[in-house]
Amino acid sequence: MNVPAAAAQKRVVIVGASGMVGGYALRCALENSAVIGVTSIGRKKLGIAHPKLTEVLHPDFADCSALAGTLAGQDAAVFCLGTYTGTVSDAEMRKITVDYTVEFARVLRISSAGAAFSFLSGNGADPTGRSRMPFARYKGQAENGLLAAGFAHVYIFRPAYIYPVEPRKEPNFSYRLLRAIYPVFRALFPNQVIRADDLGRAMVDVAVSEPGQRGGRVLENRDIRAMVESR
């Protein structure tokens, strides 16, 4: 959804734009008439150019202090940085999933206290910390950290299976299987799938156009689909 430019002009920062969902979020932000500028922060160049786009390379998200100036004056953040289960060690997964998220949020909160925050979590995220699945525990810890950071608006997205849309090298067997059976899976379990482009667009749209009630809002896969279908 594009909001008329006269309604609001927002500056958006996107973390993880080199990834699947972050890449779509970047495209959607650049196309959104309510967005006047987009800052992409990542560890490698994206290889694209756009008059709205500013790229900032940041090698280590364990310390985001150097980003304070870049994050000043931002109206919204879309945080899609993450990793897949089985691709890194448990310690590295926790660092990427929890520590990087909380550290970035800390600096953004100092630099742009009024910014809205869209966070790519995941289906089954467990804020209680009782889950036996590391991914669920760590996403839950990251959610808790964001909700405690003091942002006026936090949007936590918990997608189930994210359909890649464009061909890619799948990260593990489960993703290869789900892609192969996607048409049947989508027909049988429509609320357990979401297209990557729809997810990216929803994360941007809600952050720039729906301040709504103050506080945190958790969007399960069903809620994300309803949001997409209503626009």
Image (cartoon, rainbow, N blue to C red):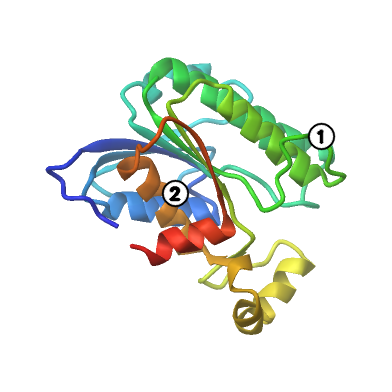
| Marks 1 and 2, how far apart at CA | 28 Å
- Closest to the camera, between mark 1 and mark 2, is 2
Please say if 78 is above or below 23. Answer: above
How would you rate the neighbour count of disc 1 (Cα within 10 Å): few for under 14, some for 14-19, many for 20 or more?
A: few
* For residue 166, side relative to residue 189 (left or right): left
Mark seen at residue 70: none
Which residue is label 1 attached to? Answer: 91
Residue occupying the point 39% across, 24% down: 71
Based on the displayed image, in which of its 4 quarters is residue 131 positioned? Answer: top right
Which residue is label 2 attached to? Answer: 203
Please say if 184 is above or below 226. Answer: below
Residue occupying the point 42% across, 62% down: 228
Q: Position of residue 222 (x, y in %)?
A: 56, 61
Q: Nearer the viewer, residue 21 or 63?
A: 21
Q: Position of residue 215 (x, y in %)?
A: 48, 30
Residue occupying the point 60% across, 77% down: 186
Q: Quadrant of the N terminus?
A: bottom left
